[in-house]
Image: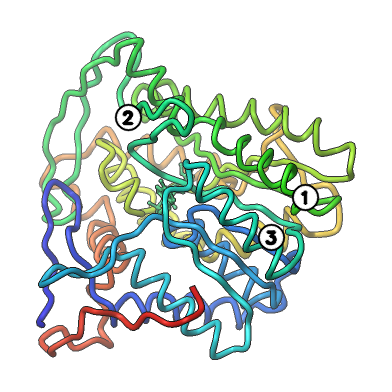
Amino acid sequence: MIIKPMIRNNICMNAHPGGCELNVKQQIDYVRRNSPVPAPQRVLVIGASAGYGLSSRIAAAFGAGARTIGVSFETPAKGSRTASAGWYLDQAFRKEASAAGLEHKSIIGDAFSHQIKEETVQEIRSMMGQVDLVVYSLASGIRIDPDTGEMYRSTLKPIGRDYRALSLDSRTGEVAEATVPAATEEEIAQTVKVMGGEDWELWIRALQEGGVLAPGAVTVAYSYIGPKLTFPLYRDGTIGRAKDHLEETARRLDTALRDSGGRAWVSVNKALVTRASSVIPAVPLYLALLYRIMKEKGIHEGTIEQCVRLFSEKLFAGEEPPVDSLGRIRIDDWEMRQDVQDEVERDWEKITAETLPRLGDVEGIKEDFLRIHGFGFPGIDYSADVDIQARTDDNG
Ligand code: NAD
């Protein structure tokens, strides 16, 4: 089958297996060039098939030789429909890890469910006994409560009043104005239920009760803050409430884990084009400015560069990682640098459809958006016939 990107409402509906494989290989190459990366040897990544979770897994496996278990929710190819990008990315990780002699297991299913937690506990027990690092990197629009069966939806809305902002279509590069209506109390509560810390805490409890969380284990979840100009929609909006809850959960987990020498952290990461961030109004536009400015200054990073720096300079550098006043690790430090943010603010005021190509790295955004789905790699022949039924191997 010949696969071209199918994009609707900033969501890419298909993926290219060869491009996804190249995406993973390029991340592995980066890690190898920067090896060794300090990391524990037995690692569980929840949300391991894409974005920050995939890069965390690659950094631990290929940088530190860790054995890894990755949990994700992805769909295989069916009929003429390709698999999801994360499916192919996970396949590629497994292929490369096997070739490198790295032990690994991927579990595909709903991480919010009791069943997948139990399956993971059993897998840890038989494969590695216990885990020393748990990375929590889920991004999801829905969560089914494992006890009540009730479905919750996360929304990205401002709180208190409507938000009117310019937005960028990641595919066409067009600027449009979007109004996002203020969230209801119910929407706020549902977003916290999906993207807050409740499930992270359930995971840690399940691992402890199953006896598979090693004494001294470290857990980290990812958060975002961003610039003032996206505050109304992001940090002061519904998702910000969920991130507040995630951060409160980290403090609670940290107190509990310290008794056995363990730690729980939140790392605030840099804004990047991932499947989750592409659908947020105003954010792709901010990203276009940010990419240009950070590239010009030579400090632009992708998820893999962020994860390698997080492990080697913050989490596992041998000393207590430096944190902000709320106890969070800040790997968004370069994004939030005063000179970077001053330029973003200055240029934000000047954005129009005409100025954007000059002010923003629209090509860079489009390229990243395509590449997370395996498209837009110069090394891939996209006119070639492709077998979309990616190989399934015997090792999860
Ligand atoms: P992503 O969409 O690239 O990846 C999300 C992962 O979660 C995938 O592996 C997916 O399979 C998995 N997942 C989703 N629902 C699941 C379920 N029910 N069961 C099992 N797995 C499931 O997301 P991302 O952008 O890498 O975000 C990961 C975390 O990093 C989020 O907490 C996000 O807020 C945070 N973060 C993202 C950015 C950014 O700019 N993208 C910046 C800072 C922090």
Q: Are marks 3 and 1 in contact (CB under 8 Å)?
A: no
Q: Secondary structure at mark 2?
A: strand
Q: Which residue carries the number 2 mark?
A: 153
Residue tagged 1: 211
- Residues packed near mark 1 inside 10 Å, few (<14), some (14 to 19) or many (20 plus): some
Q: Quadrant of residue 282?
A: top left
> N-terminal of the two: label 2 or label 3?
2
Instruction: Indicate the amino acid at tag 1.
Output: Gly
| Number of numbered discs | 3
Which of label 3 and label 1 is nearer to you? 1
Could you tell me which secondary element the residue under label 3 belongs to? helix
Residue that mark 3 sits on: 311
Asked if the residue at tag 3 contacts the one at tag 2, i.e. Cβ–Cβ closer than 8 Å, the answer is no
Residue in view at x 26 percent, y 50 percent: 359
Examine the rendered structure and indicate whether residue 55 appears above or below residue 343: below
Q: CA distance from mark 2 to mark 3?
A: 32 Å
Disc 3 marks a residue whose amino acid type is Phe
